[in-house]
Amino acid sequence: MHRNGPKQDIDESELTVTQPKEQAAGVTAVAVALKRGVEEMGVLRTARTLARLNQVHGFDCPGCAWPEPTGHRRPAEFCENGAKAVAEEATLRTVTPEFFAQHSIEELASKSGYWLGQQGRLTHPMVLRPGATHYTPIEWDDAYQLIVEHLRALSSPDEALFYTSGRTANETAFLYQLLVRSFGTNNLPDCSNMCHESSGAALTSSIGIGKGSVSIDDFGKADLIIVAGQNPGTNHPRMLSALAGAKANGAKVIAVNPLPETGLLGFRDPQTVKGFTSGVAIADDFLQIRLGGDMALFQGLGKLLFEAEDRQPGTVVDRAFVDAHCAGFAEYEKSMRAVDLGTVRAATGLSDDDLHRTATLLAESKNIIICWAMGLTQQKHGVATIEEATNLLLLRGMIGKPGAGVCPVRGHSNVQGDRTMGIWEKMPEDFLDALDREFGITSPRKHGYDTVDAIRAMRAGAAQVFFGMGGNFVSATPDTGVTEAALRSCALTVHVSTKLNRSHVVHGVTALILPTLGRTDLDLQNGTKQQVSVEDSMSMVHLSTGRLKPVSEHLRSEVAIVCELAQTLFGADHPVPWAQYQLDYDKIRDAIARVVPGCDDYNKRVRDRDGFVLPHPPRDSREFRTTTGKANFAVNELTWVPVPEGRLILQTLRSHDQYNTTIYGLDDRYRGVHGGRKVVLMNIDDITEFGFVDGDLVDLVSEWTDGTERKVTGFRIVEYSTPRGNAAAYYPETNPLVPLDHVAARSNTPVSKAVTIRVEPHVHVEQPS
Ligand SMILES: Nc1nc2c(c(=O)[nH]1)N[C@H]1C(S)=C(S)[C@@H](COP(=O)(O)OP(=O)(O)OC[C@H]3O[C@@H](n4cnc5c(=O)[nH]c(N)nc54)[C@H](O)[C@@H]3O)O[C@H]1N2
Ligand SMILES: Nc1nc2c(c(=O)[nH]1)N[C@H]1C(S)=C(S)[C@@H](COP(=O)(O)OP(=O)(O)OC[C@H]3O[C@@H](n4cnc5c(=O)[nH]c(N)nc54)[C@H](O)[C@@H]3O)O[C@H]1N2
Ligand code: SF4
Ligand SMILES: [Mo]
């Protein structure tokens, strides 16, 4: 079944730009999904795989964390990007030991992430010995030995880092954190540190739990839905169906975004007959906000809501809810009344009319949901911004009733589950107590490093072993130059991966690639079929069963890799029954049931038709387990992102044809960018002011407060509808521009959505031959 990947890398000179699309999804989306499937998997495998995607006895889509509808499921419960995610994983192209013999590390390091990923699935465990030019095959047992030797050589367990990306299933996540804590450290950085950490921090402080409070059914009951800092047409495509359904029931949708994202403005549902021929506008109103202006918006709206209450007392503030369930209301009211609307207009770029229109809708709607993603979280004041959004909902009594609530829309398909299972550098004491009781271990209590601190630790020589459970650490993290040097300084880097990526070629002195099964793959342990479980963005937990024949007999499941490594590391008489867990994942689920809150009877309930929903006290009973025992109104000083003279504020975002650092193709169809990725979207007035024209090649230079500069070169200017002073370019190409120390207050999340840059003409430097 071996097939080779494409030989050609990206040629940016083939980049073309067309008008952005006015409607998302529709027939083209279906056609693209099928074409990508057939290219990678062939016709039969495509048909078999897509038929099982998101179905009750099938596998969970590895695309994103948007939930499946409960009850009746349509025959095709997936979207274009879900199909692409599956094609990417279920591909028949392979990266074999022969591939590694043909390509040196130096050569692979010169390729784009796109090229690396397109080569196919990894088939063998591989090792790069100190000073070697090529990866060579290694036996699994020898690989474990090598890791254990390095771990034992450390002077403290805290010198090892154990990263997790959010595709990892609950069973793996639970065992992995157990291994790490048995070893003696809480160094469990994860992709969530770069993603919804700000949501977790804000919601925990405001309502006592870091998860969203709505279910998919609430969308059908809402009459106002605000979607802020999110591009669902690309990143959570089936959310558009939920929004379209809400609108059919009379809801209004407001999009808050610097860009007129296609999916928000128009949508053709490919799963309905009508959707093939006509579309609906999703957003009733579009607030084209300036980057980082959301906190000002929510504060301005807070002020206007109090003024509306003054005009018609008793109609806006939900006194009964506030009195019974909230703390800090008086301080909040005082701070809102002091908000200066002039500052709000400057910070947001919105008009008085925009603010009043939105406030009126907020005051009059009976059931309000606020959704958000990276546009809010990856800001310096991301935590405070989310608290301000939550304040508005508390004021209106919108938590813990049908059709209303907070909705952080998670990224990776199991990033929320990983947290529930203990992947966090600072898990609460009661979780660690339960873990210790169950297994007779002593978990360390000192908090570990998150992602940014992990990079700092490597840079400082305080960490020498990096272990990645999935993901692509080097490309996903900020400040690429700094991070690459940090990883290269490690004695050992290990990656459990499905596909080749840049983290394999920017390596420690010794490096290992451990190839693993993905969601779609059949997982047999000792001849018995195993299943895993996952949790979506709305706390629904259910099983996922892969059925495809793995591309190589040398792949091992993530669970098997953790269990085998643990046995090598701890020996046979360790209190955790690793060997049993490996052979029967039901046994892992039994342990999860005893340790993880809300998971009682886990084995039975994950097998229910739609799975089960984890408890959420504010949603279930308006109970708020915060420091005050009530929902907390937060008071924050207004923060926003002014544009310095002659500079731009740059956001780094996803194209329609990528999954984080995995580039599926070169077609950002909705935005009209084709054939390449090095573009910078700019407002026409900025282009003109800086003396450029659309199509010019430029270098982007980021400036940081300590006087240091970072640069990426050869980007094409594309005239685009974005607020004055705000620009956009794709991640990960622009990660070198994000300073490591540019992080959100209270969540330490890299500020990927507001980097100060200047734009310089691109000077072509001839390489010496
Ligand atoms: N196909 C596909 N699906 C994905 C992913 C993928 O890469 N590809 N990634 C997954 C992951 S891990 C995640 S976290 C999610 C990410 O999902 P999103 O958060 O939708 O992803 P981004 O592309 O970062 O888009 C950020 C959006 O916020 C807007 N924005 C930026 N800054 C601001 C701001 O200051 N204020 C406001 N109001 N808006 C702003 C941008 O214009 C853009 O529309 O998607 C998940 N799903
Ligand atoms: N500038 C900038 N940087 C960002 C962001 C941004 O918006 N702007 N977004 C941030 C966000 S929200 C996130 S979540 C992170 C993402 O950070 P990561 O999660 O680290 O990155 P991914 O690109 O999702 O990881 C892709 C790799 O995962 C491996 N993989 C895929 N499936 C599996 C599997 O089933 N098992 C295993 N073991 N491996 C698998 C493959 O080898 C693939 O190459 O990036 C962050 N970085
Ligand atoms: S919305 Fe997300 S989870 Fe659902 S099919 Fe699309 S990519 Fe997969
Ligand atoms: Mo994410």
Image (cartoon, rainbow, N blue to C red):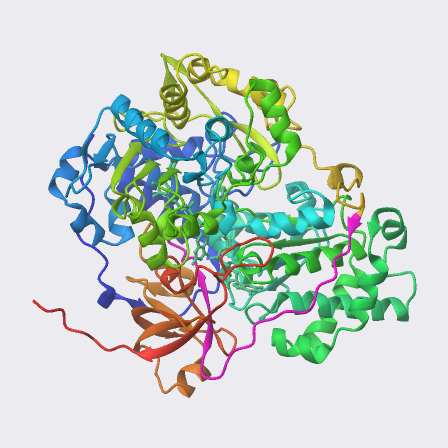
Between residues 155 and 649, which one lies in front from this camera angle?
A: 155
Is residue 729 visible in this depiction of the protein?
yes
Q: Is residue 658 magenta?
A: yes
Between residues 429 and 683, which one lies in front from this camera angle?
A: 429
Q: Quadrant of the N terminus?
A: top left
Residue 707 sits above or below residue 527 on the image? below
Based on the displayed image, in which of its 4 quarters is residue 728 positioned? bottom left
Residue 418 sits above or below residue 307 on the image? above
Q: Is residue 646 magenta?
A: yes
Side (left or right) of 109 relative to 102: right
List x then y, in percent, for residue 27: 42, 51
List x then y, in percent, for residue 654: 43, 57
Between residues 758 and 317, which one lies in front from this camera angle?
A: 758
Based on the displayed image, in which of its 4 quarters is residue 358 positioned? bottom right
List x then y, in percent, for residue 700: 35, 72
Dominant secondary structure of the residues highlighted in magenta in the image: loop
Q: Quadrant of the C terminus?
A: bottom left
Write the residue at 42% across / 32% down. 51
List x then y, in percent, for residue 590: 57, 17
Which span of residues is magenta-colored? 631-659
Side (left or right) of 366 relative to 750: right
Side (left or right) of 417 relative to 360: left
